[in-house]
Image (tube, helix red, strand yellow):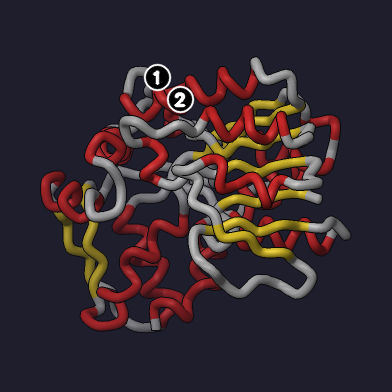
């Protein structure tokens, strides 16, 4: 049995489907009760209290560990989850980390994530670490304004990064959970192209077949919006990257293709599959 945390999110949901399609028993963990695919067990647990995960880990052989924003906050104890998993008999953990651990190692949230990576390496378990860059699904934050105003509002309109489709992250995670060849792997996950927020708005417009206007936010405006959902330090780290990506953050990684045997999917593919959210 494989435990998937963050099972209702943009990575966890397709990962759960991929694992069940591969014939695995899956326990989906989320903070609140939710519908899950047939045959999947659901456990409601708040990872901020690691012991709440104990029922989900009973009988598990592997764990996909995804941390929500509050687990990057001061006082959070995500490393305890690794010890709890090991004590429960879990043999493999795949951690969803961040590209910034390597590209911006001194950012506060990156220091904490690197410490968690190190705790995983020292756990004695099989492990793999996934370090994605920006998510294509972050564009869902624009869905309401596109539907109601025909507008995308974002900072740094003409600064691009190679955003990754979360479904590609999920497929890589499934491979790492199921295939011994990926034990000890650290994979940087990006999309196949650098794309700016303005270009993303154009892709949404093309898929809708109707105009979408781009409105550029200031950094302060963007931070105010982001801190409604994530700690201020994480918002600043993110804005530093998307506002002035360094060469490592602009690099197109070969790791998706290395694991999956195909290129990562471009942003316009993600838009086509999710266009209903913008109508």
| Within-10-Å neighbours for mark 2: few <14, some 14–19, many 20+ | some
Residue 166: % across, % down: 56, 54
How many numbered marks are there? 2
Q: Is residue 35 above or below residue 226?
A: below
Looking at the rendered structure, the secondary structure element under dot 1 is: loop
Residue 150: % across, % down: 25, 78
Looking at the rendered structure, the secondary structure element under dot 2 is: helix
For the residues labelled 2 and 1, say whether their Cβ atoms are less than 8 Å apart.
Answer: yes
Residue 264: % across, % down: 63, 49
Please name the residue shown 63% across and 28% down the image: 83
Please name the residue shown 17% across and 56% down the image: 216
| Numbered label attached to residue 105 | 1
| Numbered label attached to residue 101 | 2
Tell me where residue 22 sits by quadrant. bottom right
In front here: 182 or 246? 182
Q: Does 184 sit left or right of 121 as displayed?
A: right
Tell me where residue 123 sits by quadrant. top right
| Numbered label attached to residue 52 | none
Q: Does 179 sit left or right of 83 as displayed?
A: right
Is any part of residue 261 visible from this angle? Answer: no
Is any part of residue 46 visible from this angle? Answer: yes
Please name the residue shown 51% across and 72% down the image: 274
Please name the residue shown 88% across and 60% down the image: 23
Tell me where residue 57 sits by quadrant. top right
Q: Seen from this angle, which residue lies furthest right?
A: 23
Alpha carbon separation for disc pair 2 and 1 = 5 Å
| Within-10-Å neighbours for mark 1: few <14, some 14–19, many 20+ | some
């Amino acid at each position: 049995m494989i435990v998937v945390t963050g099972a209702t999110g943009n990575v966890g949901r397709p990962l759960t489907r991929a694992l069940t399609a591969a014939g695995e028993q899956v326990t989906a963990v989320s903070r609140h009760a939710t519908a899950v695919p047939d045959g999947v067990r659901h456990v409601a647990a708040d990872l901020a209290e690691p012991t709440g995960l104990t029922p989900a880990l009973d009988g598990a052989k592997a764990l996909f560990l995804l941390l929500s924003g509050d687990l990057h906050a001061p006082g959070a104890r995500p490393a305890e989850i690794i010890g709890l998993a090991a004590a429960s008999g879990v043999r493999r953990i795949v951690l969803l980390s961040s590209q910034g651990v390597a590209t911006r190692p001194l950012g506060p949230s990156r220091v904490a994530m690197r410490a968690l990576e190190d705790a995983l390496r020292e756990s004695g378990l099989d492990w793999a670490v996934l370090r994605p860059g920006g998510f294509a699904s972050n564009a869902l934050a624009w869905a309401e304004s596109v539907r109601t105003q025909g507008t995308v509002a974002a900072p740094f309109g003409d600064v691009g990064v190679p955003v990754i489709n979360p479904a590609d992250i999920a497929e890589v995670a499934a491979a790492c959970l199921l295939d011994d060849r990926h034990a000890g792997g650290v994979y940087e996950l990006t999309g196949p192209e650098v794309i700016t927020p303005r270009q993303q708005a154009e892709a949404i417009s093309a898929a809708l077949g109707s105009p979408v206007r781009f409105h550029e936010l200031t950094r302060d405006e963007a931070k105010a919006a982001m801190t409604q959902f994530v700690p201020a330090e994480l918002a600043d780290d993110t804005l530093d990257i998307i506002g002035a990506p360094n060469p490592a953050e602009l690099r197109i990684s070969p790791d998706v293709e290395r694991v999956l045997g195909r290129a990562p999917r471009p942003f316009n593919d993600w838009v086509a599959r999710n266009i209903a959210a913008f109508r």
